[in-house]
Amino acid sequence: MSQKVRILLIGDDIAGREKISDTLKKLYTKGRVDVIDSFKSLREYYNLSDYDIVICDFNLSDYNGIEVLFYVRERELQLPFIFISDTVWEESTIDTLVLNGASDYVSTDNLKELEFVVRREVNRYHHFRNTKLKLQASEFRFRSLVQSINGIVREIDLETLKNIYVSPQSMNILGYPASDWLENRHFWLEQVHPKDRNGMISKVNQVIQEGGHHTLEYRMISSQGDIVWIRDLLTIREENGVPVSLDGLMIDITKEKEIVYQRDLAIEAEKRRMKEQKCLWNITNLDEQDFTIPQLLHRAMMLIPIGFQYPKFIGVKILYANEEITSINYEESEVVISSQNLKLRDDALSIEIVYLDDEPFQSGEIPFLEDEKHLLDTIIDILAVKIAKKRSSDDLKKHEQLLINTYELAQLGRMI
């Protein structure tokens, strides 16, 4: 290994420490292993941020291992912490260590396992730290970008509540000239989105009463009728302790909001795909040879709802060979999708999915997504294949039994 890994090893067993230290130095030839024998030394002389991992004996002369773990977690929450001990680990002890934040626990006589655990935890920590640095850099770039964006600077006199200054950027961001703001004291409020207007009145009054700095986010309507998301940085300016003006910097964050919206859509889509895959996986793994066909369909009926947006509102009905299998909560509904497979010999297979409550759709959501229709078609195809295989297997067993019976009759005939 060529990583420059910094390891803090705590233990008062000299021979044990040296053995473990030698193992770690071989594991990370360019690394550094600092060895200490007391909790006191740790607290007085060592900075945890200098290390990539802490390996600690569970019991030492001057401390209990849990105390050290708490000490580390209070200062470096994500720093890997591995317990070592020459005693057999009780299950209750292991549970306690994990619940209190230990990364792992290893017996001192199993150095191979220790190498594996150290390598794993160091790699995880490096990944976490690199990700954190990237996030910090990204956040810095984002803030720099926001601060560099030209916004609408405005000043409102608190005695008259009139705009006494509005910067020319009002034309670029909202399409209104500064003169519109200066001539009409209510101009800002009139352009705030109707759904945000009442909330903004109370929030601005709160800003004036509390003073200091505040940030508000709301929607405005541009001169073209478009919705523009605004982040308004407000400051109450005082003279001799008396509030005299409200200064604001209005920044267009519409693109930022769109990115967040698209991100949320992508997250929701990924969650739906995972639910659909789980549903298909469970149904595909039903072994048709373990059940009768009605039993197979009943188990599938119980698994189907987990693939849909709102499983608790789903009802399922399966029709096959003049037999109807329904979920306990099933009832007729106008919100329904269905799928049918006609490839099975003699008997058709159909599945009907209903939503039993329109509560989730009051906000305008679509009851059934296009992906859910595809999911249902895939489910019915899988079940059709399983039914065909089951029937073929049953037919084969019948033929085998017929041959056995025929053979036994022939043998009986010879004996007579």
Image (spheres, rainbow, N blue to C red):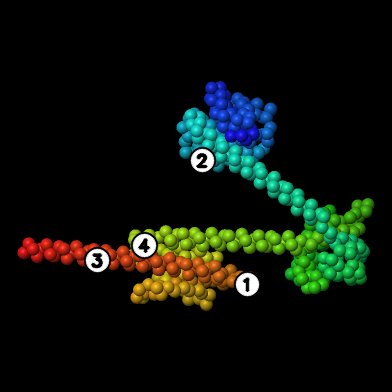
Disc 1: which residue: 364
Q: Residue furthest bottom?
A: 334
Provide residue 313's location: percent of width, then percent of height.
52, 68
Disc 3: which residue: 399
**Is the Cβ of the residue at disc 1 closer than 8 Å to that at disc 3?**
no
Provide residue 178's location: percent of width, then percent of height.
89, 67
Provide residue 395's location: percent of width, then percent of height.
28, 67
When asked about the image quadrant of residue 3, the answer is top right
* Side (left or right) of 152 relative to 82: right
Q: Label 2 sits on what residue type?
A: Asp
Q: Label 1 sits on what residue type?
A: Gly
Disc 2: which residue: 95
Residue at the spot 49% in from the left edge and 59% down from the top edge = 278
Task: Give the distance between the C-alpha atoms of the residues marked 4 and 3, in whole angstroms.
Answer: 19 Å
Provide residue 129's location: percent of width, then percent of height.
66, 42
* Side (left or right) of 341 relative to 119: left
